[in-house]
Amino acid sequence: MPEEQAFSVLVKIMFDYGLRELFKQNFEDLHCKFYQLERLMQEYIPDLYNHFLDISLEAHMYASQWFLTLFTAKFPLYMVFHIIDLLLCEGISVIFNVALGLLKTSKDDLLLTDFEGALKFFRVQLPKRYRSEENAKKLMELACSMKISQKKLKKYEKEYHTMREQQAQQEDPIERFERENRRLQEANMRLEQENDDLAHELVTSKIALRKDLDNAEEKADALNKELLMTKQKLIDAEEEKRRLEDESAQLKEMCRRELDKAESEIRKNSSIIGDYKQICSQLSERLEKQQTANKAEIEKIRQKVDDCERCRGFFNKEGRIKGMSSAKEVLDEDTDEEKETLKNQLREMELELAQTKLQLVEAECKIQDLEHHLGLALNEVQAAKKTWFNRTLSSIKTATGVQGKETC
């Protein structure tokens, strides 16, 4: 059972079941319960009652803990649980049933004891007997079987109050007033002591509250300073963030312009390369066509020479003209010059093509460098953003963590 529910049960037993009345007015109600128990013993266990009279054993000497603690002082808990359950169901009169049950089951042993032996029996041997659950169960069955009417208990209560009134009337008024005066003085002294204790506790609590308030104010000042520092750091971080964003935008714009320039150069070089390729292909086609036409013309001339008997004598077997070596040399020289010119043009075109390819490679390398610089710049911007964000977040966490600890 939780502590709150247990305390609620205690309050219920003390106020609604009348257990609190046993502790009030010098235990007056408790002595009334002792008188009722002795009268019940006289009715239900007369021989044990007479034996207690003979040895001068009164009920308050052995039964006070039964009523004040509900048998929890000496007896095992499983037995006490049953007693409390009966108490919650039937009321405080259940204590008389259990007390008579204990006395009745122990009657034989108690009749053999004297005053000291009876007190020792109630203190030691009786609780040991009910460490067995079987004996406790038999005791509870016996207690439930005994019927004690409320009318009889009211009758015994009236007898007790009548007896107390008679004793008060027979008592000397001066002694009674002196006793009442002593009781009131003791109560007054107790109340004064409680008042002093409460005043001391009040002063101590005020001092402690003043110290706590001072500490709280100091902590509040420290937290305010920390908050101002954090706000300033946040402002600086936002300014740095804006600066980095501006730099990043400028860098992106510069990279975009460089990329556009490189792309335009690449397109220009590509167009030049395409033109050179077209020119080379045209020259190659013209050269092939010229060579084909020359070969066809030579074959036609050779065929005509072979067909003519007069011209056949001017040519040797290889198809060359006899005795006209100078003309051949001139013709060969013209042909060689034309070939050399074509070769020179072809070499120049190849050189220009190689230069164009080299420029293209340089442009690609430059583009790669620009992309690399752009990647580094983006990484730096991202790292700066992360560093700013982490620093801001850590500052906020530190501030909130410190504030949470101080608040706790």
Image (tube, rainbow, N blue to C red):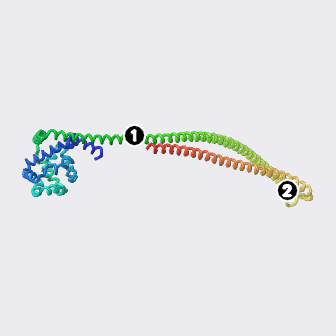
Specify few, some or many for label 1: CA neighbours under 10 Å numbering under 14, 14-19, or 20 or more: few
Q: Quadrant of the C terminus?
A: top left
Specify few, some or many for label 2: CA neighbours under 10 Å numbering under 14, 14-19, or 20 or more: some
Position of residue 278 measured from the top left corner of the image (x, y, whole percent): 75, 46
Instruction: Please name the residue that numbered disc 2 is placed on.
Output: 306
Which of discs 2 and 1 lies nearer the camera? The answer is: 1
Instruction: Please name the residue that numbered disc 1 is placed on.
Output: 206
Q: Give the amino acid at mark 1.
A: Lys
**In the rendered image, is residue 336 in sight?**
yes
Task: Give the vertical position of 159 relative to 140 (above or below).
Answer: above
Report the residue at 16% width, 39% height from top: 174
Position of residue 204 measured from the top left corner of the image (x, y, whole percent): 38, 42
Q: Is residue 304 left or right of residue 65?
A: right
Mark 2–mark 1 distance (CA, rounded to whole Å): 143 Å
Position of residue 325 measured from the top left corner of the image (x, y, whole percent): 91, 58
Nearest the eye: 39 or 135? 39
Q: Is residue 256 left or right of residue 154?
A: right
Q: Secondary structure at mark 2?
A: helix
Nearest the eye: 112 or 130? 112
Task: Give the vertical position of 123 relative to 231 (above or below).
Answer: below
Q: Is residue 400 left or right of residue 87?
A: right
Report the residue at 83% width, 54% height from top: 303
Q: Earlier in the sequence, mark 2 or mark 1?
A: 1
Nearest the eye: 18 or 130? 18
Report the residue at 87% width, 58% height from top: 320
Q: Give the amino acid at mark 2.
A: Asp
Task: Give the vertical position of 177 relative to 360 (above or below).
Answer: above
Give the residue at the far bottom of this rendering: 317
